[in-house]
Amino acid sequence: MTQFIVSILIISGIGAVLALLLEFADRFIADYGECQIMINREKELKVQGGSPLLFSLQDEGIFIPSACGGKGTCAYCKVKVLEGGGPVLPTETPYLSADEQEDNVRLSCQVKVRNDLAIEIPEDLFLIKEFKVRVERLEDLTPYIKGITLAIVEPEEGITFKPGQYIQLEIPKYKLSSAPEFRAFSMASFPEEHQKIELYVGLVEKGIVSTYIHNYLKKRDELVMRGPFGDFYYQESDRGILMIATGTGLAPIMSILRHMHREQIQQKITLFFGTRSEDDMYCVEELKSLEKELPRFTYVPTLSRVSDDSPWQGERGRVTDLIEEHIPEAADLDVYICGSPEMVDSCLEVLEKKGISEDNIYFDKFS
Ligand code: FES
């Protein structure tokens, strides 16, 4: 038995060393020369081979959505690779459905440019821009969430976005990273303000970008940002609206609410905002004043970890409990959900049971 285990360990070790050698050779020895990337059968790029497609396109000013900075964990960076991408990699398969694989969809952060490629991307990705921004405000909203305001330095016209969309923020290399890193953050500000944006950044354990923002970023620092991205945004309709958020998932919801307030949109809106404790609540004053100024808006905070002897007067439990309790069967609603993947999935399950049409449900999963 011991001999068997030792053999397995030796074989695994050899496999790992070989994989490392291949990666090393690919990165530092292989020379793929100049490669051509044909986009949508009309735009042709010449790039130096050897980099992931996501970054080769980024270097040419074409910004593909990404929330994980190219780590292969968010699945936002899907593009169609019609020719030259090689076989689908094991790192991609968990994120691609059978139909997507059939349709040549790939994760652009995992496909390396080693030869000429033909790809297809949505035309509106050509509209995404790169911005230089300056940190104007850094504020602790809760022990784990910072509110930051970024003023746009370049280009002068600022950013145009839809309420609910997100940007990618790039931080420079520092002691926890060997190269610049970027992550996605939803904008909390209203889109009528083009020169400044507000973000809520949660501190992620061992998170390179969130640690930098929480512990190293200073006022007046300049950063690079790209955007706007995403198809989670306010959809005009006459239906009532149910908004559900937890943690930093409140950011796109605030953008939508601020936009509706500014434009005096009079739909009936209910917001269920869940946190663990009262210390994790933020934007409370603004949400209460929005309740006064938007007469059809109701703000319902709920705490999931509150002791029985707490003076907390509001709801207790998870946001899913609120859906169960307060939302009627087959209600004709537009639903916007933002928070952790687990929370979003649980809400979708409850809404499905309630018979809420999935055509009117919009969600954004924050990893
Ligand atoms: S960029 Fe996140 S999976 Fe590719």
Image (cartoon, helix red, strand yellow):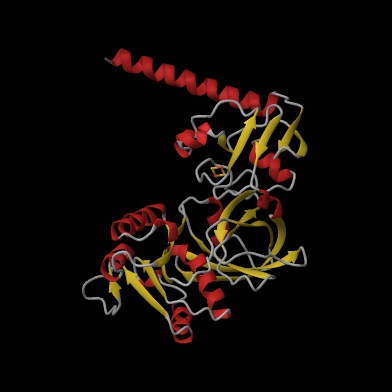
Residue at screen point 65% across, 49% down: 173
- For image coordinates 21% across by 72% down, the residue present is 308
Which corner quadrant of the image does residue 354 belong to? bottom left
**Which residue appears at 52% of the width and 78% of the height?**
265
Q: Quadrant of residue 38?
A: top right
Residue 108 shows in the view: no
Residue 347 higher or lower than 314, as above or below: above
Task: Name, please, the residue furthest toward the left.
Answer: 308
Name the foreground residue: 189 vs 330: 330
Is 203 or 50 nearer to us in this picture? 50
Ligand 1 resides in the quarter of the picture at top right
Q: Position of residue 345 (x, y in %)?
A: 37, 53
Give residue 138's position: percent from left, percent from top: 58, 69
User: So how many labels did they put on this image?
Assistant: 0
Is residue 277 at all visible to an observer of this figure? yes
- Residue furthest to the bottom in view is 292
Picture layout, residue 361 above or below residue 20: below
Residue at position x 65%, y 40% from top? 120
